[in-house]
Image (tube, rainbow, N blue to C red):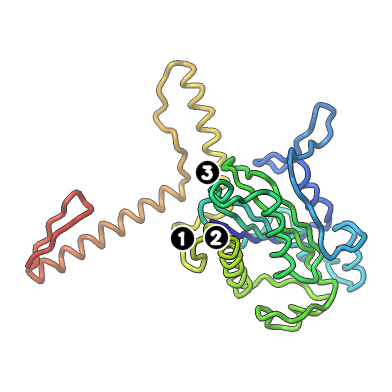
């Protein structure tokens, strides 16, 4: 099912956003991958379009808007928004602040099975991304770029949508716009909780209309894992895999194959305590009511007076 993720950036180098989309980068350091001549390597495959940029590049369109409206001159000003969508097994939407401070990212993800079951291609994903951007971020300079796979190598066709924070023209008011700054030219994009909720609904409706797999994004879906914890787990797993490879080469059997962060360990311990506490209280109340409880394989149970 699709996911949508939001990141904001204050980086004044607008060209860096397009560079990330078109060149290969190390997923752990964020640095560009160089060829044998020391030049950045282009990605093997991608589709890229711009919106609301006229004859200019995305970077130039953003700089022109900044100068015209006299904004984004401070270091703390959010200058761009980045939206990206790729297909994991379920769809979420959440927001966080990017390390580089210059653009905001919205990340929408489709189910990897959509490619086989529902005919999702890069071209189709790009078309969906372009329409999503036009519908939900009108008036903002934007880059829409589709990649064939994500860093988790799950076969995730994903679409990045990068928008400049300033709206370059006044647009028609939409139902999800509640203040004049949401449709007037020269105003900045606001990613509020209401906006995030609207985007969740918009992604669900988009997937339904396109006959793609989808779940209810308005309901909590399992544990929330932060961006920091996600990458801590990825780096830890990489270190563990390297260590296990050395053990295997020496003929030894690894004792651990899955890396677990300290937060995940704590989370599981707390859940176990809650589960045991709830069970104990439940059985205590049953005994007070003179009700016998018989557990069968810890899954099915029978209760008798």
* Disc 2 to disc 1: CB gap under 8 Å: yes
At a point 79% along the width and 64% down the height, the residue shown is: 164
- Image mark count: 3
- Percent position of residue 30, x then y: 71, 43
- Percent position of residue 83, x then y: 69, 59
Secondary-structure class at tag 1 = loop
**Residue 221 tag number:** 1
**Residue 92 tag number:** 2
Q: Which residue is mark 3?
A: 233
Secondary-structure class at tag 2 = loop
- Local crowd size for mark 3, using a 10 Å CA cut-off: few (<14), some (14–19), many (≥20): some
- Local crowd size for mark 1, using a 10 Å CA cut-off: few (<14), some (14–19), many (≥20): few
- Percent position of residue 213, x then y: 52, 57
Q: Which label sits in the foreground, 3 or 1?
A: 1
Residue 151 visible in the shown view: yes
Q: Earlier in the sequence, mark 3 or mark 1?
A: 1
Left or right: residue 239 compared with residue 8? left
Residue 169, by quadrant, is: bottom right
């Amino acid at each position: 099912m699709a996911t949508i993720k939001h990141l904001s950036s204050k980086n004044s180098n607008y060209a860096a956003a397009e560079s990330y989309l078109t060149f290969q980068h190390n997923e752990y350091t964020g640095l560009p991958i160089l060829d044998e001549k020391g030049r950045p390597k282009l990605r093997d495959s991608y589709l890229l379009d711009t919106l609301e940029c006229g004859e200019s590049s995305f970077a130039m369109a953003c700089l022109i808007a900044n100068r015209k409206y006299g904004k984004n001159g401070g270091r703390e000003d959010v200058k761009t928004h980045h939206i990206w969508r790729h297909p994991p097994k379920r769809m979420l939407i959440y927001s966080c602040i990017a390390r580089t401070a210059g653009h905001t990212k919205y990340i929408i993800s489709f189910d990897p099975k959509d490619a086989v079951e529902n005919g999702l291609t890069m071209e189709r994903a790009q078309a969906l991304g372009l329409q999503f951007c036009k519908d939900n971020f009108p008036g903002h300079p934007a880059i829409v770029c589709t990649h064939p796979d994500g860093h988790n190598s799950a076969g995730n066709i994903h679409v990045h949508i990068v928008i400049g924070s300033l709206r370059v023209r006044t647009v028609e008011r939409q139902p999800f716009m509640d203040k004049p700054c949401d449709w007037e030219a020269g105003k900045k994009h606001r990613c509020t909780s209401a906006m995030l909720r609207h985007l969740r609904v918009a992604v669900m409706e988009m997937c339904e209309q396109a006959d793609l797999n989808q779940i209810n994004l308005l309901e909590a879906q399992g544990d929330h894992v932060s961006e920091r914890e996600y990458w801590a787990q990825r780096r830890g797993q990489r270190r563990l895999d390297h260590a296990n490879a050395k053990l295997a080469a020496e003929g030894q059997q690894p004792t651990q194959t899955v890396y677990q962060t300290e937060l995940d360990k704590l989370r599981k311990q707390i859940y176990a305590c809650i589960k045991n506490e709830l069970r104990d209280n439940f059985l205590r109340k049953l005994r007070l009511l003179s009700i016998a409880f018989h557990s069968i394989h810890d899954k099915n149970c029978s209760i008798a007076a």
